[in-house]
Amino acid sequence: MDRLKLGSLFDGSGGFPLGGLLAGVTPVWASEIEPFPIRVTTKRLPGMRHLGDVSSINGADIEPVDIITFGSPCTDMSIAGKRAGLEGAQSSLFYQAIRIIKEMRCATNGRYPRWVCWENVVGAFSSNQGFDFKAVLDAVIGIAEPGASVPMPEKNRWPYADVYMGDRWSVAYRVFDAQFWGVPQRRRRCYLVGDLRGQCAGRVLFESEGLSGYSAAGFRTWQRAARYPSAGAGATGGLCLNDQGGSRMDISEEVTSTLRAESHGHPPCVMAAGFCTEHSAASRSIGYGEECSPTLRAGVVPAAVYENHSQDTRYTGPLDTAPTVSSTYGTGGNNQPFVVSVHTAYTMTMCGFPQVSRERAPALLARDFKDPTAVNRGYTVRRLTPTECARLQGFPDWWCAGLESPEPTEADIAFWSKVWETHRRIIGTATKPKTRNQIVRWLQSPHSDSAEYKMWGNGVALPNVFFVLAGIAWCARMRDRMHNDSQVYLCTL
């Protein structure tokens, strides 16, 4: 069969195009107005065309595709916002996507697109007392059956999964929580799939698991530690210790807290899964096994990393192991928190004297010892790095790397001048267009942590996207196989 083609509206980090590639779907075009995400996807997916503002796109004039995805802005439906709903300035862009889909179907006599996928926050269920989600369902179903109206559920409380079917169409939705799909964050999102020429939407979300190429084992790709530490740090997932107060620690499987801030009488600790099994609040000790590699620790020194603790000298331990952050003081208060990096040759003793040792060195010291390189005094929890945010969404570390253009061409400058002007016109944060020199300087160094943080915060969890698009690709293959074998179709054509 021919490869399915995908168009991505409100593209952001490029999650739907990348998920499509992993599922055997070809991304053809995308729409986005934020310059930094566009820069990322033009580097990572150079064959994908960028169409700009959704309000200026005519669905009849662009290349027809089999799948249109749209994670329309959720600002007005999130429980963290002002709950303006679909009538809000941002979330009303949902109807621009519906318009584009209808225009394309009208121009192709209903052939394209067959599939639509909408992603959004679970706050959509309660926005405007539940009537906003009804409007979403009515609009998507209305593409295939104009005038359709979905009844409100009992007490206006939408279930977290459901299927609607009619004459030659189907719509299904389901809530996914990213923590159960191989990434260490709790991120619940609603995925709605519409099959506008058949009755396969429910099969995509509820029956394709294991059949579409997805399996629980298959998502271990997202569970491995990234790059070089993978051999020493082990895989995420597995066992997680959960603080239940006092000296009690419960163990859960395959569910990992990103950060817990309750102390229950002793400092909170966040632990990467491994084989740590015992914690004592009184003695600040911890039982451990191999492959125990915490990402953030605010309560106890991991014995798997530090074999010996000397009150007035220094920490020592085995080579090639290191926590990202360790912030525990010794019993006398003389030992200061620090971060250890591997494969260096310089260490700092707790008394402030440097000492050379093989492949061990502190990265951060929380007390300066009269050293101007100190970065912190007292207790604090550090912010996640942009790379960690990429991992939380299931993306590779290098997704935002190598974005520079040392010598941009005239075509580059013209394209990005248009991108920045579109952004200025819509967002309205600048009164004047960027000059040519500003565009050139930005292209030479387009990355900033703030822009990357914003992109990941608005992005999608890649494993969830891959599952949905793999299910659509599986249904398409099954339909074609049935057609070729002249058997009864499982999906209405």
Image (spheres, rainbow, N blue to C red):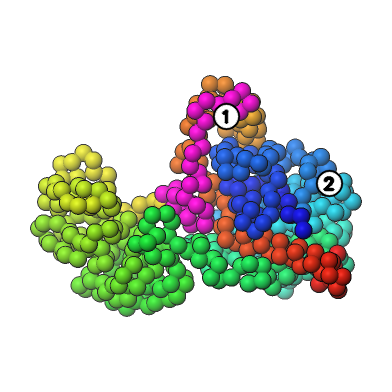
Q: Quadrant of residue 130 in the image?
A: bottom right
The picture places residue 241, in percent across and down from the top left corner, at 37, 73
CB contact under 8 Å: marks 2 and 1: no
Q: Residue furthest front?
A: 485
Q: SS at mark 1?
A: loop
Residue marked by disc 1: 430
Q: Amino acid at mark 1?
A: Ala
* 400 w.r.t. 155: above or below: above
Q: Quadrant of residue 200 in the image?
A: bottom right
Does the stretch in magenta take in 394?
yes
The picture places residue 307, in percent across and down from the top left corner, at 19, 66
Q: Amino acid at mark 2?
A: Glu
Please give the range of residues in magenta: 385-412
**Nearer mark to the viewer, of 2 and 1:** 2
The picture places residue 96, in percent across and down from the top left corner, at 75, 46
| Whether residue 67 can be seen here | no
* 164 w.r.t. 319: above or below: below
Does the stretch in magenta take in 21?
no
Q: Is residue 89 left or right of residue 300?
A: right
The picture places residue 1, in percent across and down from the top left corner, at 77, 58
Residue marked by disc 2: 103
Q: Residue furthest right?
A: 109
* 115 w.r.t. 206: above or below: above
At x 48%, y 57%, the residue is 392
Q: Quadrant of the C terminus?
A: bottom right
Q: Earlier in the sequence, mark 2 or mark 1?
A: 2
Of residues 366 and 46, the one drawn nearer to the viewer in this rendering: 46
